[in-house]
Image (cartoon, rainbow, N blue to C red):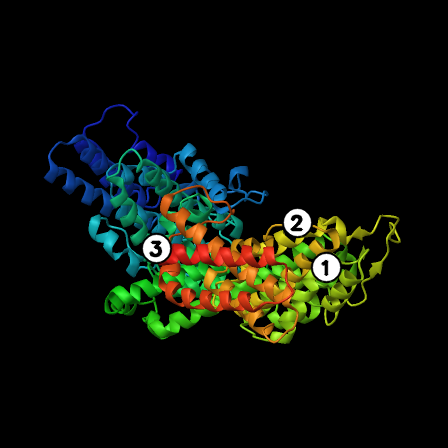
Amino acid sequence: MTNLFSNSSLLSDQSTPAMSSVEADNLCALLSQQCYLYFSIGSRLTFLGFRHAEAALSTTSISKQNEHVTAASNYLREASKHWHNISHVTGQLPGTASHALTGKKQNAYHEYNEFAMRALENGSPLARAASVLMGVNDVAGFVDVCLTCARNFDYGSFTTTDDLSATSELLAGSMLPWERTLYHRHLNEATDDLKSGVVTSRDNNASTSKEASSVAKRTCYGLLYYHLDQLMESVAELPQNSTLVERMISIATSSPDIAFIHGLYEYLASSGHVDTLLRIDSSSFERWLQSKNDYHLLWRYYTVHNIHWMAGEVMWNRGISIADKVILEERIECLTRAMSSYSVALRDLNHDSALLQNRIASRTSSSGDLLSQRYGVSPSRDEVNRVLSQLNEQIDVAKIQTRILSTIMSSSNAKNIDEDQTAALRTTFMDISKLYNDFAAPLGLYDICLAILQTCKHDDSPTITKLWRSILCEELLPCRTKSKVVQGFLTNLQRDSMLEEESVIFSHTSVTKENGEPLMSFEDGDWITNIKSRVIALGKELHGKGTDFVFPLRFIAECLEGLRRIFNESTVNTSDHWTIKVLVESGAPFTSILEAYHSIFSSQSDNSNAALKLQELSNIGEVLKLWVSLAKSSTSGSPNTVSVNVSNGNKTQLARYSNGILAQIDRYKAELESLVGCNSEEVSRCYALFNDIEKILRRGW
């Protein structure tokens, strides 16, 4: 009877020959009272705990079952205080290979699972006690047994005489106080002897190392984590077990053992039970998440607990972090999530601000401090709105930075900046002024320069005009032309742009570039398609966002009409009014387009060039014609001749401004009648166009 584990197993193993419970009780009582130096009190308590658990499982009476479960829980809790030998935990003697810590680097789930499976396979008293308590759904007793046993292997603390008083009341033994730890000494007491050089040969635990103690503690935790994992996995088939899961986690996280609690968090995170982990409402868990620096998990935690402004704060700080090198795509994702979280916070404030504040104020940390004291009071509606506006601007800036990086890496511009600058673009959230001055402007990224001015709401008309000149010249130059008029127009357009050094060559024959490629001929018209696409794309990006100054309609219309006119003159061509269609497809409303063309015409009113005035009036007529056509097609549902989504807004706007348009048509017709020296057929055609529009407007609008 020198093996304590063998004794306790013998008295509780169902495979032993049948013995009446009375005889077993008498034998256990006799051994614990008269052979207490060999048969520990823990063995007796273990036997009684297993017996009551077995009785609870075998009875059909609810009251009797509850009574046996309570007794089993009490006995096993007291028994766990006496499991100081590592064999009680692992089921094997100290010093065996299975007690060695694994040399492999594993995550928390696999590491603790390995310890738990080892104890279960060897059938240690702790493993069996854990199984029987979970078998009777006593999660509170199960958690207490595991954590009590784990504390037995703490260095610097051990069970004192006073701690055994409750056990002494359970067993009417005759053990004297000085005999209690004579043969059943605590691990730490034996370790202290080792440190001081005093080792007694009769002490079974004298050779136990700190490593073995660590294995024992982690096995205790591993068994708890293992059964918790099994319980969580069973919820899919047994939904009622979700209550047991919540209760077990609540009891476990109330433990003062910080190492255990942090291990529990790690285990849940690495075992795939993140959703369960995030439902833990604890300031301890909140601080653990912050210490882990896992911004994504912390954001999810605040989201689950409806503290959306804090969730937004986490993602916002990550998105604009200076200390951390965060790739640009991740920054945009973080800022977008922050935007979403703050939007939900604003919605909550609008719906039930008082309820939200009360919920936050009711949450306390383990030290008793309120969340409102630790993080400040939830922001007001105005503050959230300011944050949302700032986030929106920062997302725009980050997207512009992405465009700059993408453009640089996919073009010859990559050779113009060093690797450090490229790395900074990839991982640093840059100031928008730096993006403009150090990258967009020097590298000739004119479209992005306009986007930056729009984001900053910087209405700098000379700069904007210069950028648009550069954009148009970029699609036109260098080129050659057979017309001096074309050369003069392009040279004038080129002036005050960022492409003043590009060539406009007057030549009737083919000209080649330095690389041997033929220089583009203006008269070939290949530039038209490129300019159309670029203006439409920029219009859709820039126009109609409250910053229309970056898409100056009059200047763009004047430039495009000038290009169309000199192209027609130099090629003896009569192309359709593609310029107007481009502006419509760019997203500009007809009211703004008509105003731009009217402004161009008004600036020509004192000009003696009658042909140019006729051209401007014809353009106005074409704008009105297209407007009326699209308004009619939106009513009839007929196919649209222009590739643009037409809404009923065209019809509504035309009806609203029809009286003013009719009055203006009379003035346009008077101007046509006063023109002298123009092509009479063109004048008649334009006059008839205004007449047709006037009839339609008077008839139905």
Q: Nearer the viewer, residue 136 or 277?
A: 277
Disc 3 crowd rating (10 Å Cα; few below 14, some 14-19, many 20+) is: few
Q: Is label 3 in contact with label 1 (beta carbons under 8 Å)?
A: no
Q: Amino acid at mark 3?
A: Arg
Q: Position of residue 562 (x, y in %)?
A: 66, 62
Quadrant where the C terminus is found in the figure = bottom left
Q: Residue at x 21, y 38 (%)?
A: 52
Numbered label attached to residue 474? 1
| Left or right of residue 278, residue 541 in this image | right
Q: Secondary structure at mark 2?
A: helix
- Label 3 and label 2: CA atoms lie apart by 38 Å
List the residue tagged with mark 2: 529
| Left or right of residue 271, residue 558 in this image | right
Residue 41 versus residue 586 in the image, above or below:
above
Residue most extreme to the top:
17
Q: Quadrant of residue 321?
A: bottom right
Quadrant where the N terminus is found in the figure = top left
